[in-house]
Image (tube, rainbow, N blue to C red):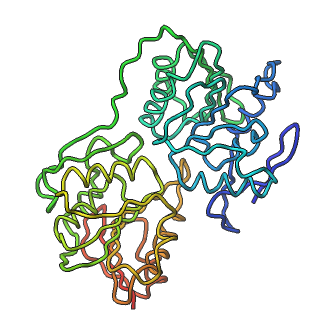
Amino acid sequence: MNRLTTSGAGYELARFPEHPRDPFRAWDAADEYLLRRLEGATDDSEPVDLSGTVVVVGDRWGALSTVLAEHRPVQITDSYLAQRATRANLERNGAAPDAVRLLSTRDTPPDRIDVLLVRVPKSLALLEDQLHRLAPAVHAGTVVIGTGMVKEIHTSTLRLFERIIGPTRTSLAAKKARLVFSTPDPATARTPSPWPHRYDLPGGVGPASGRTVTNHAGIFCAERLDIGTRFFLGHLPERSGPERVVDLGCGNGVVGLSAALANPAARVTFVDESYQAVASAEETFRANTGPAAEADFVVGDGLADMPPSSVDLVLNNPPFHSHQATTDATARTMFRGAHAALRQGGELWVVGNRHLGHHVRLRRIFGNCTTVAGDPKFVVLRAVKR
C-alpha cells in the first residue's frame, strides 16, 4: 500500500487484489497531474468546478474516484478489479460505500455530464467506443480532460477526442505525463460507433472453424484471431460427457465455444474481469449454439468465487500485461485459482509464449506439468490436480 498526497489530504491506496510485495502503485504521474489540474495547481489555472455531475472513465485502481469521493462522482470502467479496488480504497480512506456510483462500460451512462475525466486506456478502440457512448451527455459547458502517460497519448488519441467531442489540445508533459483538453462542440457530426466488430474464424481451428465471433471494443485482438489462441484451438483436449469446463480469461469466448461444440454435454463457464469480454463471449456463444445450449458468464476475479473442487477442466490463455506493466502476477493468480477449483484428476490447459516459462510456475503449484504441443513461439501445457 502507498500514500497519495494532494494539496488537501493524503490517501492510502492499493491495487486489487492486494499483495504485500506488489511493486506497483495504485496510481501514477498521470493521475497526479490530473488531480493538480482539478485543484488549479498547474499553469496558473483556476480550479475546476466539480459541483455538477462528475464522470471518471477508466480509473484504473480507484485512485481518482477515491480522491474525488466528496463530489460523489460516477466511475465508468471495463474492469471488475478496478471496481473492487475502488470499493476497498473508499473503505480504507473512510469514505461512504455509496460515495462513488460504480458503472461498467456496459451500463447506461448518465444523461448529463458536467465534468468528464478520462484516463486514456491502452486500447484505442475502447476509448473510441466510450467517447461515442458518452458524447450525447456532454454539453457545451462540459469540462473534458483526459490524462495519460506520454507513451499512451498519440496523434490517433487526440484525433478521437477531436472527432467525437470537439477541438482538442494537449498540455506540456510533466513527469512523463500529459493532459488532453477537449472543448465540446454540439455541432460535431459524429458517425455511429463501429463497435462491436464481428469476423469469421478461419478453417483448420477445430470445431469453431468458420464460426462468427463478436468482439466489443477493448478485447484483445478484436479484429482477427490472435496466433496464440489459434495455436491453442488446434491442440485442445478431446473430452466427452457431462463435464464442468471453464474458459478462464475468456476474451471473446472462442476457446470456450470450441470446447462446447466439441462436447455438447459439457457445461462451460466463461470468466473474465472485463465486462466487454464477457459480453463478447456471451454473444459469440449464443450466435453459434442451439437454443438449448447452456453456459454461464461471469465477470469476476478469476476463479476466486468458484466452489472448490467443482471443475473438471480449465482452459487458459493468461495475459502477461497489467495496463502498461509487464507482469506474471495475473497468470499466477489464475493458476492458483484453477488448482483450487479443479477436482482431483482435473486438468488445467494453458497456452502461452514459450519465453514466459509458465511450466516452472505450474510445477510449483500442481507438482507436475507436461508439454502437449509447441512451436518456436508458443507452448500448450497440461497440469493435473493430484
Q: Residue furthest bottom?
A: 386
- Give the residue drawn at x 56%, y 52%: 325
- Give the residue drawn at x 19%, y 80%: 241
Q: Quadrant of residue 353?
A: bottom left
Q: Residue furthest right?
A: 8
Residue 193 picture location, percent across and down: 37, 27
Q: Is residue 353 visible?
A: no
For residue 53, above or below residue 321: above
For residue 145, above or below residue 382: above
Q: Quadrant of residue 125?
A: top left
* Rendered-image quadrant of the N terminus: bottom right
Residue 200 picture location, percent across and down: 18, 45
In the image, 218 versus 261, the foreground residue is 261
- Give the residue drawn at x 40%, y 65%: 355
Residue 156 picture location, percent across and down: 45, 25
- Give the residue drawn at x 39%, y 39%: 217
For residue 348, above or below residue 45: below
* Rendered-image quadrant of the C terminus: bottom left
Residue 361 picture location, percent across and down: 47, 76
For residue 149, above or below residue 340: above
Q: Residue furthest top?
A: 187
